[in-house]
Amino acid sequence: MSNNSGKNILHTLIFTAFLFTYTIMLPFMDRASSAASGVLWAGMNDGTRVILHYLPNITRVIGFISFAFSRRLLPGTGSRKNLLVIISIFFVSSVIVITIGVSPVLTLISVFILAFTLGHLGGLMYYMMATYMSANPFSGRMTGGALSLSILIQFILQKATGETGAVATAVILWFILIYIAFRPPDDYILENPLPYADETDRWIRSVRRQMFIACIILLLITVISIRTDMAFISMQLNDTIDIYSYPRLFMIPGYLLLGFAADSKRKSAFNTLFFAGILLAFPIGLVASAESGYMALMSIYYFYASFYIFFLVFVFQRLAPKTTRPELWASAGRYIAEIYTLITSVIFVHLHVDSGEKGIMLTALVTTVLVALVYVAISAMGFEPSISPDSAESTDAGADPTSAQEQPQDLDSFLSSYPLTPREKEIAVILLSTELTVKAIASDLGVSERSVFRYCASIYEKTGTGTRVGLMQAYMKGK
């Protein structure tokens, strides 16, 4: 994969730019929403105010899901580009209105619009990364690196320029990301990938089982995170502590550790490290009664939070390309967590779970035990599917796709007689000169299996052969 290190770095930086924009805009929206809703929703009961407080989260969820639906409703790349232009206009307009602060009503409407646009772009960026990393052995390190860089840049920029400079930078990065979507480093951002070939019932059941387990684990760790969030948010509201200070940098080692563990050949490495990080939730529950050491506890909290965020980003990105709707599932970790957060928060408020340190500690302990049980089950069943959809294809482990460069002239002449793109020609040479499966080709080229399937379909259509066997027969007849 050394020949793809440049593309790996490029995709990591692209994802970093989005994550930075996302993390900058969240507190920007929260502060504007709190100020506006404080005026509009005064006098309402706690349960109603919690629901209204999370309305921007709901519109952000709609934004994430809207990206997936736009892929179905807008089949052409031109219409998809036009939609991105419209989304960008609404994004900039809402940022301007929020910054100016015309009125509470307009500010709140702008927050909803901004949340929607942020979610839509998020769906695009998560889909891009999921597609690129589906067969990439550096996917964990790329995810951890992007998350770490976004936190580091955010910390430095906010210290140097304040919120105004950070928001301005986020707006600039937004347009850079839109430009990249128009001129992507690969050709899958605005196009539809083909489904896996020969998907078996066992394969489908395996993927569904993994996705179901991932959703259950996300639910449990979301409950833990809400409990710890409530403690620190209350402290911030009382001006006791600044939750955006330097302890936030402790997320970086958590991201990097999980990134390397995810890429480890030992499948138990990620499971073990992830569970160890989740166990940190229990001592964090003590923060409500602590009279000192806030910053130390805050550092532990952020280190723990990195495990939660890495899980909802990486695991769903890894599973998405194996589903029939990768554009929907790639960002599922984000919007499912938002839905869980809304439901759980409303329940906690109505049950008054947030009162008392014993309630905090008990919630953390019980939920941690449940996470342990689920994680034991997921480790026992295996997180990776036991079958590949192209398992029926023969594999030659010793075959080297790079040997395609040493093919006889007649192969080059045969392919030159068809209007193939350079990438299609490269893959056609591999198809004709090796017995590598689509999965192996994708891994060696550093692209997704879906992209390889689409290239193959285009090759078969342009050559009029229909299948790999047909392509081989046409080549042999022409020799």
Image: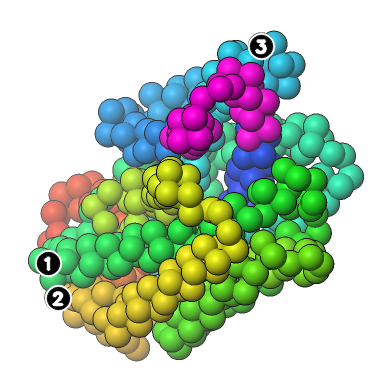
Q: Quadrant of the C terminus?
A: bottom left
Report how far apart the C-alphas of labels 2 and 1 lie in the structure.
10 Å
Q: Earlier in the sequence, mark 2 or mark 1?
A: 1
Dot 1 amino acid type: Thr
**Residue at image x 23%, y 46%?**
462
Q: Which mark is residue 200?
A: 1
Question: What is the secondary structure assignment of the residue under circle 2?
Answer: loop
Q: Closest to the observer: 132 or 361?
A: 361
Q: Are marks 3 and 2 in contact (CB under 8 Å)?
A: no
Q: At label 2, which amino acid type do we have? A: Ala
Asked whether residue 40 is drawn in magenta, I would say yes
**Residue 421 in view here:** no
Crowd class of label 1 (few under 14; some 14 to 19; many from 20; radius 10 Å): some
Mark 1 or mark 3, which has the lower sequence index? 3
Which residue is found at the position 45% from the left and 80% from the top? 271
* Number of the label disc, if any, that sits on residue 103: 3
Q: Quick check: 165 above or below 111?
A: below
At horizontal 62% and vertical 39% (from top left) the residue drawn is 26
Q: Earlier in the sequence, mark 3 or mark 2?
A: 3
SS under mark 3: loop
- Is 385 placed left or right of 476 in the picture? right
10 Å neighbourhood of mark 2: few (<14), some, or many (≥20)?
few
Which residue position holds label 2? 392
Report, in whole angstroms, how far the alpha carbon at label 3 lies from the one at label 2: 63 Å
Q: Which residues are magenta?
A: 30-58
Q: Quadrant of residue 132?
A: bottom left
Q: Residue furthest right?
A: 160
